[in-house]
């Protein structure tokens, strides 16, 4: 196996990776490109990309941490209402930086220039999901990209 190939298989050990999901509202709005551009302009790299529509079972698994909350059912309905685009993002301090780029959960309270302020329309339809470093980021990455970092 070539050294570069070994590097690509192991780099997730050295380079911080995180997950950003472009939610169905933003996909429908036609801002996939603008969101990707924003991430790249911030100096972060897109290391993987997948577009798909989640089943209800998958959505409930992805959002398992919110099971039992009053917004859970509505969140699941929304996330399966159309295709999502999952981005594997990498770079220094990627987890915190992508959360900052996403902005506060409620677009009305999100700072100027953040993705949710620019493209979100309500607390539920808030354009993007950014993996939370306080939760299980690796699990979320595996959910969309399997065990190995891509490509
Ligand atoms: P995310 O996980 O999507 O990056 O968002 P977050 O950490 O800022 O927010 P979180 O508390 O984890 O909530 C997950 C998603 O659930 C929807 N939500 N709806 N009161 C509500 O109706 C409500 N609260 C949360 C949002 O779509 C939020 O992003
Ligand atoms: Mg969250």
Image (tube, rainbow, N blue to C red):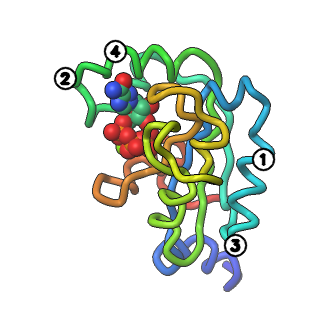
Residue 88, given in percent of the width and then of the height, sits at: 59, 55
Residue 141, given in percent of the width and then of the height, sits at: 47, 51
Q: Is residue 5 above or below residue 74?
A: below
Query: CB at mark 3 closer than 8 A to ligand 1?
Result: no
Local secondary structure at mark 1? helix
Front position among marks 1 and 2: 1
Mark linked to residue 34: 1
Find out whether the residues at labels 2 and 4 contact each other: C-beta distance under 8 Å. no
Disc 1 to disc 2, how far (Cα)? 34 Å
Question: Residue beneath label 3, please?
Answer: 43
Disc 3 to disc 2, how far (Cα)? 37 Å
Question: Residue beneath label 2, please?
Answer: 68
Local secondary structure at mark 2? loop
Q: Earlier in the sequence, mark 1 or mark 3?
A: 1
Residue 5, given in percent of the width and then of the height, sits at: 68, 75
Residue 27, given in percent of the width and then of the height, sits at: 70, 29
Q: Which is nearer the eye, 8 or 119?
A: 119
Q: Which is nearer the eye, 41 or 61?
A: 41
Residue depicted at x 72% and y 57%: 38
Question: Residue beneath label 4, please?
Answer: 73
């Amino acid at each position: 196996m070539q050294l570069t190939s070994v590097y690509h298989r192991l780099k997730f050990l050295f380079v911080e990776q995180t997950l950003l999901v472009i939610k169905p509202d933003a996909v429908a709005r036609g801002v996939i490109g603008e969101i990707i551009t924003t991430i790249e302009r911030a100096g972060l790299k897109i290391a993987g990309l997948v577009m798909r529509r989640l089943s209800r079972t998958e959505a409930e698994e992805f959002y398992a941490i919110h099971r039992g909350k009053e917004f859970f059912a509505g969140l699941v309905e929304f996330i399966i209402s159309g295709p999502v685009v999952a981005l594997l993002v990498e770079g220094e301090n990627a987890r915190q930086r992508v959360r900052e780029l996403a902005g506060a959960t409620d677009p009305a309270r999100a700072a100027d220039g953040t993705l949710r302020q620019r493209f979100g329309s309500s607390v539920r339809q808030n354009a993007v999901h950014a993996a939370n470093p306080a939760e299980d980021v690796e699990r979320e990455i595996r959910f969309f990209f399997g065990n190995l970092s891509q490509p």
